């Protein structure tokens, strides 16, 4: 009887004692900072100032490394202004000019962070969209890509519903109405404007589409969502440059970036180039409604290879 009573208590204690072990597999904040810095050092992104024998030396050296990296990146953005052509002739020049304008708007708020060296190591947890392009570590890009894929997978139910709604109603979410026409009398492919407006009515649907394109969640708040419309305008222009320049000069990272921007992030690495070529042949010259529908269809119907289904 004694053994019978004690044994369950021992099992309970052992079970409780093992619970913290499940959280030990997740790296701490400081471990992730160290891993990002070590990875950037090995890639030559951060300068290597020698061994760091203790925690105090590691913190001081890493802070100086990041301060040097961030300051160099900011000066690079400032110097780059004079080297860029105001009339781009290639997609790379056009994208670099666009990136330059975005970087210039981020420098001032980022410089405020440089005033406090203690928080510099924690800047690596900021989303890359908040930072100038010249001061983003490889670890930040990997986390952004992983978070993008995870958010799209979580949004798949809403994305599938949005795709079915487009298929059923044949609506065009991005069609601009003629001011001379009565809003209640306008009909799009047999569907009244009220049905078109309903597509953006549910915030869960707007948020899912923001996740699809890797846009911040706050851009899903307006109706219609101005952030999504702005991104579609960017894709329209980017598609025109891709059609003009072709895909032969794109590297693997550029191909991956292009498919992610088009809401095709679930595609495997081996299929990314062929999918982007298909996009240029069948979608790139179409309307923004066709772009959205193609991205939703891909999310609703595509089965990733790694799922093993």
Image: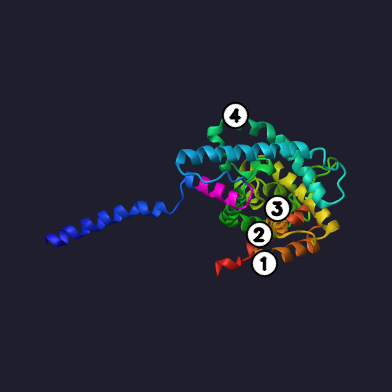
Quarter of the image containing the C terminus?
A: bottom right
Q: Is there a contact, CB below 8 Å, between mark 3 and mark 1?
A: no
Which marked residue is nearer to the observer: mark 3 or mark 2?
3
Q: Is there a contact, CB below 8 Å, between mark 2 and mark 1?
A: no
Magenta residues span 32-45
Place of residue 146 in the rendered image (x, y in percent of width and height, measured from the top left): 58, 54
Cα distance between the residues tagged 3 and 4 = 34 Å
Place of residue 45 in the rendered image (x, y in percent of width and height, measured from the top left): 64, 48
Q: Of marks 4 and 2, which one's residue comes earlier in the chain?
A: 4
**Figure quadrant of residue 101:** top right
Cα distance between the residues tagged 1 and 4 = 44 Å
Front-most of 57 and 111?
57
Number of marks in picture:
4
| Mark seen at residue 115 | 4
Residue at image mark 2: 164
| Mark seen at residue 270 | 1
Q: Helix, strand or loop at disc 1?
A: helix
Q: Helix, strand or loop at disc 3?
A: helix
Q: Of marks 2 and 1, which one's residue comes earlier in the chain?
A: 2
The answer to whether residue 229 is left or right of residue 7 is right
Which marked residue is nearer to the observer: mark 3 or mark 1?
1
- Residue in the image at 77% along x and 43% along y: 98
Q: Helix, strand or loop at disc 4?
A: loop
Q: Of marks 3 and 1, which one's residue comes earlier in the chain?
A: 3
- Mark 3 surroundings within 10 Å by alpha-carbon count, few (fewer than 14), some (14 through 19), many (20 or more): some
Cα distance between the residues tagged 4 and 2 = 51 Å
Residue at image mark 3: 261
Place of residue 160 in the rendered image (x, y in percent of width and height, measured from the top left): 62, 58
């Amino acid at each position: 009887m004694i053994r019978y009573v004690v044994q369950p208590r021992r099992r309970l204690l052992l079970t409780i004692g093992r619970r913290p072990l499940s959280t030990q597999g997740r790296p701490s904040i400081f471990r992730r900072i160290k891993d990002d810095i070590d990875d950037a050092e090995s890639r030559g992104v951060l300068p290597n100032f020698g061994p760091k024998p203790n925690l105090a030396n590691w913190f001081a050296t890493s802070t100086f490394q990041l301060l040097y990296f961030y300051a160099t990146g900011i000066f690079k953005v400032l110097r780059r202004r004079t080297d860029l052509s105001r009339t781009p002739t290639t997609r790379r020049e056009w994208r670099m000019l666009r990136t330059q304008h975005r970087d210039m708007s981020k420098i001032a708020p980022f410089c405020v962070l440089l005033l406090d060296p203690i928080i510099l190591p924690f800047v690596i947890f900021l989303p890359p969209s908040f930072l100038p392009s010249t001061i983003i570590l490889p670890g930040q890009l990997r986390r952004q890509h992983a978070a993008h894929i995870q958010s799209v997978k979580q949004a798949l139910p809403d994305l599938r519903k949005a795709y079915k709604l487009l298929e059923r109603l044949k609506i065009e979410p991005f069609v601009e109405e003629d001011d001379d026409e009565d809003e209640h009398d306008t009909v799009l492919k047999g569907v009244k404007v009220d049905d078109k407006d309903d597509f953006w009515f549910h915030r869960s649907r707007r948020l899912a589409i923001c996740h699809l394109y890797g846009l911040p969640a706050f851009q899903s708040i307006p109706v219609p969502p101005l952030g999504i419309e702005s991104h579609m305008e960017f894709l329209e222009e980017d598609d025109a440059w891709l059609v003009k320049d072709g895909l032969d000069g794109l590297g693997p990272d550029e191909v991956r970036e292009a498919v992610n921007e088009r809401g095709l992030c679930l595609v495997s690495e081996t299929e990314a180039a062929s999918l982007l070529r298909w996009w240029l042949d069948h979608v790139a010259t179409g309307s923004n409604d066709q772009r959205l529908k193609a991205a939703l269809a891909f999310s609703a119907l595509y089965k990733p290879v790694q799922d093993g289904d």
